[in-house]
Image (spheres, grey):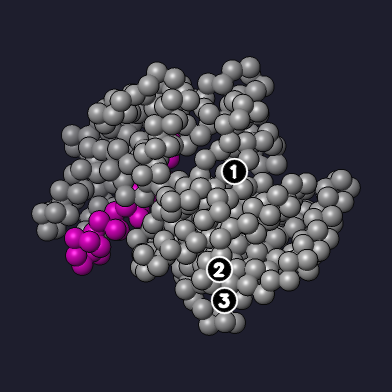
Amino acid sequence: MVVVIPCYDEPELELTLESLRACKAPRVAVEVLVVINAAEGAEAGVAKQNYLSLQRVQALDDSLGDPRFRLHPLYFPKLPPEHSGVGCARKLGMDEAVARFAELERPQGLILSLDADCRVASNYLQAVEANFARHPKSPAAAVYFEHPLDGSHVGIISYELFLRYYVHALRFSGHPHAFHTVGSTIAVRAEAYVKQGGMNRRHAGEDFYFLQKLFALGDFSEVRDTVITPSARLSTRVPFGTGQAVGRMKAIGHMGYPAFAPELFRDLQCLFRRVEQCCELEFQPLPSCAGLSPVLADFLRGLGFDDKMLEIRRNAVSPRTLRQRFYNWFNPFRVLKFANFSTAAAYPKVDVVQAAHDLLQWRGIHAPEYGLELLHVYRKLDSE
């Protein structure tokens, strides 16, 4: 098991490493690769902090003296600016993990992606290991997470509610790839990482795009019996994500957060139900745009939907592959494109508290009126 941690100007890195070290030992050995990185020309303060991180990782590993739990710094102080950033750092670390597993002839080895400002529960390593033992065909998994709700950044309530609402809205629609796409919660087998071409070098959103490739393999799983606690700190190091979201809410002076209207997911539900019916009825023709909502029909026509359905049907050898081909084409990235399209054309965004409340009511689940209570309901649904 190899844990990969991108590290850029991280004064609290040691707390993350101590959190990992305090974990109950899994059956396999654990290596932690800390990818200390910066772009060429980075500020002097960043370079100094990175060098301190390098020294601390080396010293901590020496002090542990544990052959079954090792810390290894990977030091990249002057990356080309076009290839620097969190995506590149994750890729460097995960590629190195693959190389280590290849040397050991362990294609089933597990690569865990974490961040340098996370804390993990004491059973984190054991829970991830046990999940893949229970699901031997699973190529990858997402680990359950909760941001700290200590009041230091109250905007995190709205942001985490937004993340959970979106995934549950996607599940409500019937899409089978409705999973969280948070970089610090990814666990993947080495062979699956290689098969799908590895991590990308994007400066942000690298986790979302990487996971689309893993979803396409099928049998994606979730580790719900442990917890990762990502930081709720303000940050501007990436163009979107937790730090940016919390910062924007603080800047505008209120904690509301805009979310996609639940109505657009109801439109998608009609489409996905038709697809499921076609698969169940042994190769009935796939659906056309007729009878769908006007905004969804317009979006699909722009994609050449009818021709694409004929192509998918022609290349599918069984109902299972038909279903897989459709959802690999209409994947969460295409869902997001439709969400943006329908927001502009028909369904303006609403506050996340209202959206999350309405979605629960549609599903017949008791829906509290306030954000914190709603978040607790969604957390319970995600952890069960």
Q: Which residue is tagged 3?
A: 101
First along the sequence among labels 2 and 3: 2
Disc 3 and disc 1 in contact, CB within 8 angstroms: no
The magenta-colored residue range is 314-340
Name the residue type under label 1: Pro
Disc 1 and disc 2 in contact, CB within 8 angstroms: no
Q: Residue at x 36, y 50 (%)?
A: 177
| Closer to us: 122 or 15 | 122
Q: Which quadrant of the figure contains the N terminus?
A: bottom right
State the image coordinates of residue 237 (x, y, percent, origin top left).
70, 41
Give the alpha-carbon distance from disc 3 to disc 1, as whole Å: 27 Å
Q: Which residue is tagged 2?
A: 1
Q: Which residue is tagged 1?
A: 230
Q: Depth-wise, is mark 3 or mark 1 nearer the camera?
A: 1
First along the sequence among labels 3 and 1: 3
Q: Main secondary structure of the magenta part?
A: helix
Give the alpha-carbon distance from disc 1 to disc 2, as whole Å: 21 Å
